[in-house]
């Protein structure tokens, strides 16, 4: 009985082994069929073929193709430095091109994952590009990640990777952390002064961004250095061709003037916004505040009602009208 039982078990074992082997062969064939031909040809082809193709896609601006191709490559070799970096760079480009913020953050997280993984490899030690893109990626995630944006952007700068916008991103990141002095210093570098404005007392490049001027003014306001803030806001109003940016600069300038007691000057700025844009809820609200300070309650309430016509959800105006 013992011998017979053993033989029976042996036969079953052989049949099971053959079945498993056959299944393994089928699975292997399926897996091989699912892998792109370029990978089957072996790693020797990657430097000459696949990498050149990825670089060609990059130069064409086909970041979606770079993203998907590098993602597939990383399934086979998850610690390939070239694939990790170009995948991270493509993920960043895909992220900033999205309309939906949720989609943007998905790509940004993929970028961060890929580049942080690349930093585990020795090849990344002196690669300023990785730190630069990683810092910008953390900037996209909001003020809660501003300290990490500063960390990696400073690493990039210390490696002498001087991208044109690195100082501007550093200025924004420092401001988000509350380090306004460092923010001002970074923004000042971003201005790259090649021409001065002696009348305003500030060095400003002829190509200075209007948004950059507003950003540096905000940092000066946080430092309570209002004269410097005022100079940058005036320069922004002078050079900007964007009505929304000029509106922001006028609101900030009006705030500075009003806080300093120059109510007439503040009124000019707020009224200028309405004259340029037709209507603006915040400008109307600020005008109401000015008239209230002057003791003209009727006119103040009229401005707050105008505010609510433009923006029915304006909380401060509703509170002023006891609504």
Image (tube, rainbow, N blue to C red):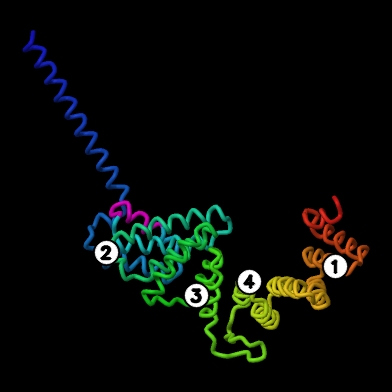
Q: Is 9 or 221 nearer to us in this picture?
A: 221
Q: Main secondary structure of the magenta part?
A: helix
Residue 94 % position (x, y): 48, 61
Q: Secondary structure at mark 3?
A: helix
Q: How many marks?
A: 4
Q: Is residue 130 above or below residue 11?
A: below
- Residue at 29%, 44% (x, y): give it: 31
Contact (CB < 8 A) between labels 1 and 2? no
**Residue 148 at what x, y percent from top left?**
45, 61
In space, the residues marked 1 and 2 are separated at their CA atoms by 64 Å
Work out how far the residue at label 2 is from the one at label 4, CA to CA, in angstroms. Answer: 40 Å
Q: Position of residue 307 (x, y in %)?
A: 83, 61
Q: Residue at the location (87% across, 68% down)?
A: 291
Q: Is residue 259 magenta?
A: no
Magenta stretch: residue 69 in it? yes
Which residue has dot 1 on it? 293
In the rendered image, which residue does mark 4 sit on?
Answer: 218
Q: Nearer the viewer, mark 1 or mark 3?
A: 1
Residue sitting at the far right: 298
> Under tag 2, what secondary structure?
helix
Mark 2, Cα crowd under 10 Å, few <14 / some 14-19 / many 20+, is few
Q: Nearer the viewer, mark 4 or mark 3?
A: 4
Mark 3 or mark 4, which is nearer the start of the sequence?
Answer: 3
Left or right, residue 254 beside residue 135: right
Q: Secondary structure at mark 4?
A: helix
| Residue at which label 2 appears | 122
Side (left or right) of 203 relative to 256: left
Residue range (magenta): 68-78
């Amino acid at each position: 009985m013992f011998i017979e039982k053993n033989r029976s078990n042996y036969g079953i074992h052989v049949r099971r082994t053959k079945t498993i082997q056959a299944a393994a062969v089928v699975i292997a064939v399926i897996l091989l069929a699912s892998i792109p031909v370029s990978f089957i040809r072996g790693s020797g082809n990657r430097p000459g073929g696949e990498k050149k193709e990825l670089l060609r896609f990059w130069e064409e601006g086909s970041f979606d193709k770079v993203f998907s191709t590098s993602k597939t490559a990383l399934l086979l070799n998850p610690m390939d430095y070239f694939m990790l970096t170009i995948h991270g760079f493509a993920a960043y480009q895909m992220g900033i091109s999205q309309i939906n913020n949720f989609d943007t953050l998905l790509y940004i997280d993929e970028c961060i994952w890929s580049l942080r993984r690349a930093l585990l490899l020795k090849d990344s030690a002196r690669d300023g590009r990785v730190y630069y893109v990683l810092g910008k990626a953390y900037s996209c995630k909001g003020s809660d990640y501003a300290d990490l944006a500063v960390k990696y952007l400073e690493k990039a700068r210390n490696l002498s990777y001087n991208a044109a916008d690195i100082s501007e991103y550093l200025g924004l990141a420092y401001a988000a952390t509350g380090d306004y002095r460092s923010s001002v210093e970074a923004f000042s570098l971003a201005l790259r002064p090649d021409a001065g404005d002696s009348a305003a007392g500030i060095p400003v490049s002829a190509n200075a961004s209007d948004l950059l001027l507003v950003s540096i003014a905000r940092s000066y306001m946080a430092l309570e250095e209002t004269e410097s803030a005022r100079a940058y806001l005036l320069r922004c109003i002078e050079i900007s061709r964007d009505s929304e940016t000029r509106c922001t600069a006028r609101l900030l300038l009006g705030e500075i003037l009003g806080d300093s007691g120059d109510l007439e000057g503040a009124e000019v700025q707020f009224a200028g916004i309405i004259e340029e844009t037709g209507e603006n809820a915040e400008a109307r609200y600020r005008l109401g505040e000015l008239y209230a300070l002057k003791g003209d309650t009727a006119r103040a309430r009229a401005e707050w009602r105008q505010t609510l016509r433009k923006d029915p959800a304006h909380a401060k105006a509703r509170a002023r009208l006891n609504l």
